[in-house]
Amino acid sequence: MTEQLDPVFQIQRVYLKEASLEQPNSPAILLEQESPSVDIQLGVNATPVADGIFEVSVTATVQTKIKDKTVFLVEATQAGIFEIRNLPQEQMSQIMGIACPQIVYPYLRGNVADLIQRGGFPPVHLSEINFQAMFEQQQQQQQAAAEAAEPSVVIQ
């Protein structure tokens, strides 16, 4: 008799893993009247911690510049520890690439805005992210890269 195991998805903890704020050109850059350009980069990472336990982190890098000088640079990583068990393998990557980042990301948004504001700047609010679209785009890029790497064989 085989025992059917119920799927498990639980949040163990959400935490700020890393945060830094750099203002390498202060105080002179603060006197500039020109509006800075803002560049925002996001990344998602999933790492097994123990059997059925995973850390999923979302990293944001926010850099503002006036001309070629950095006004400020913020790097922050918000992470969560999740228990995920008894799910088919194809669902695991979706859970860790979509569901977990959606849980962690609002905390990251708040921490980034707070850190920037505490640095003496108006807060930069990270926009909402469609992690499903981001995940699907990454899957398509990986598939295209794998197809491009396959050697082509010509039979005559």
Image: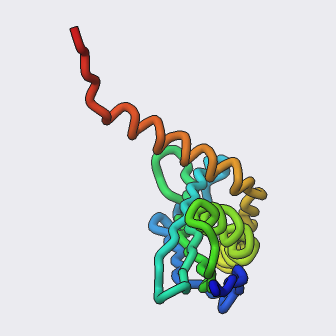
| Residue at 64%, 50% in the rendered image | 134
| Residue at 46%, 44% in the rendered image | 142
Residue 133's spot in the image, x, y percent?
A: 69, 48
Q: Residue lying furthest front in this view?
A: 1
Q: Nearer the viewer, residue 21 or 138?
A: 138
Residue 41's spot in the image, x, y percent?
A: 56, 55
Residue 145's spot in the image, x, y percent?
A: 40, 38
In the rendered view, tell whether residue 150 sits above or below residue 131. Answer: above
Quarter of the image for residue 124 reads: bottom right
In the rendered view, tell whether residue 121 sits above or below residue 41. Answer: below
Count of residue discs: 0
Decide if residue 131 is in sight here. yes
In the rendered view, tell whether residue 144 sits above or below residue 156. Answer: below
Q: Nearer the viewer, residue 147 or 41?
A: 147
Locate the C terminus and report the quarter of the image it occupies: top left
Locate the N terminus and report the quarter of the image it occupies: bottom right
Question: What colour-coding does the image apply?
Answer: rainbow
Q: Residue lying furthest top in this view?
A: 156
Quarter of the image for residue 52 reads: bottom right
In the rendered view, tell whether residue 52 sits above or below residue 123. Answer: below
Quarter of the image for residue 151 reads: top left
Decide if residue 110 is in sight here. no
Residue 114's spot in the image, x, y percent?
A: 72, 77
Q: Which of 55 and 85 is in front in this view?
A: 85
Q: Which of 119 and 41 is in front in this view?
A: 41
| Residue at 66%, 91% in the rendered image | 12
Q: Residue lying furthest left in this view?
A: 156
